[in-house]
Image (cartoon, rainbow, N blue to C red):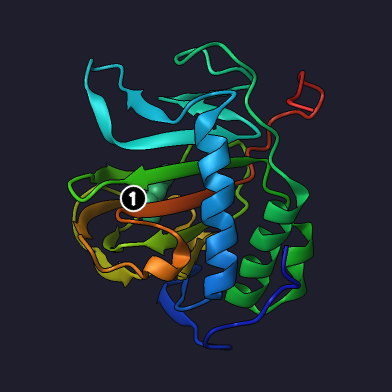
Amino acid sequence: MLPFPEHAERGVRVEVAPGAVHLPGWLPVARQRELVAACREWARGPVPMRHTRLPTGGVMSVRTVCLGWHWQPYRYSRTADDVNGAPVAALPDWLAELGRRAVADAYQDLSAREYDPDAALINFYDRDAKMGMHQDREERCPAPVVSLSIGDTCVFRFGNTATRNRPWRDVRLLSGDAFVFGGPSRFAYHGVPKIHPDTGDPATGMRGGRLNLTLRQTGLGSDEPGPG
Ligand SMILES: O=C(O)CCC(=O)C(=O)O
Ligand SMILES: [Fe+2]
C-alpha cells in the first residue's frame, strides 16, 4: 500500500448534517486504484459478490460482498449463509486504518483512534443500480459509518433519523470521496437513488459503474468464531 494519506484536496470538509461529513476528493487516484484491485479479489471469493436477496423475495440491484462479518437482511454472521455458506474474508488492518483516518479527518479530533470497524460491505452499482432509503441499524454500537466511493458519480440521499421521507439532502459523491456519518446522524436514513453513468475516471481501473466501500463497527463479540 502507498503511505497514507496524500489528500487530493486536503482539508475540504462539508458538514451535511450534525455528525455527517462529506470529504470530497479524499482518496488519491493511486489509492482508489489499489482499492479497486483489492475489491476485484474480494468479489471472487471465498464468498462471491452477489445480489442480496431480500426477505420479501426481491433482490437488490446492487451487488455486494462483505469482509469481517457477512451482512444479510437483517443480521450479521461469520458465514455467508444466504450465498454459499463460506466464512467471510477478514477485514484487513490497512482498511480499518483507512477508516480511522476518514473519521479523524471528518471530526478533526482524536476520538477516531478508537474507531475499530470490523465489517465492510463492498457494493458495486452498475448504471441502473440503486439503493433504497434505509438505516444501518444491525450494529450494536454507535460508532460512525465510513463510506468510500470510486468510479461513477452518484446521488447519495442523506435523510433524517425519524422517517425514510423528507427532509433529506442530495449529495453528489464522486470518485475518491469519503462520507462519514456518526453521532446524531448515525442512524439517519440514506440511499442511492441514481448513478451518473460514464462519469468515473478510467485511471481508477474501473471500466464503468460505481464501487462503494462501507465500513461499520458492529459491536458484536470478538469471541465469536472469526474469519482469521
Ligand atoms: O453506496 C453507498 O454510498 C451507500 C451504501 C449503503 O448505504 C450501505 O451499504 O448500507
Ligand atoms: Fe447504508
Q: Secondary structure at mark 1?
A: loop
221 or 179, nearer to the observer: 179
184 or 60, nearer to the observer: 60
Where is residue 203 shown, x and y percent of the image?
A: 44, 70
Residue kind at label 1, given as amino acid type = Tyr
Place residue 35 in its image quadrant. Answer: bottom right
80 or 222, nearer to the observer: 80
Q: Residue at x 58, y 74 (%)?
A: 106
Name the side, left or right, on which 140 lies relative to 84.
right
Q: Residue at x 53, y 62 (%)?
A: 33
Name the side, left or right, on which 110 lies relative to 16.
right
Examine the rendered structure and indicate whether residue 208 appears above or below residue 10. above
Quadrant showing the N terminus: bottom right
Place residue 105 in its image quadrant. Answer: bottom right
Q: Is residue 138 visible?
A: no
Where is residue 195 shown, x and y percent of the image?
A: 22, 57
Place residue 174 in its image quadrant. Answer: bottom left
Examine the rendered structure and indicate whether residue 33 appears above or below residue 55. below
Quadrant showing the C terminus: top right
Badge 1 crowding class, 10 Å Cα cut-off, few under 14, some 14 to 19, many 20 or more, is many
Where is residue 48 shown, x and y percent of the image?
A: 48, 26
**Residue ID for mark 1:** 189
Q: Is residue 62 visible?
A: yes
Examine the rendered structure and indicate whether residue 38 appears above or below residue 34. above
Q: Residue at x 41, y 52 (%)?
A: 211
Where is residue 214 shown, x and y percent of the image?
A: 51, 50
Examine the rendered structure and indicate whether residue 85 appears above or below residue 157. above
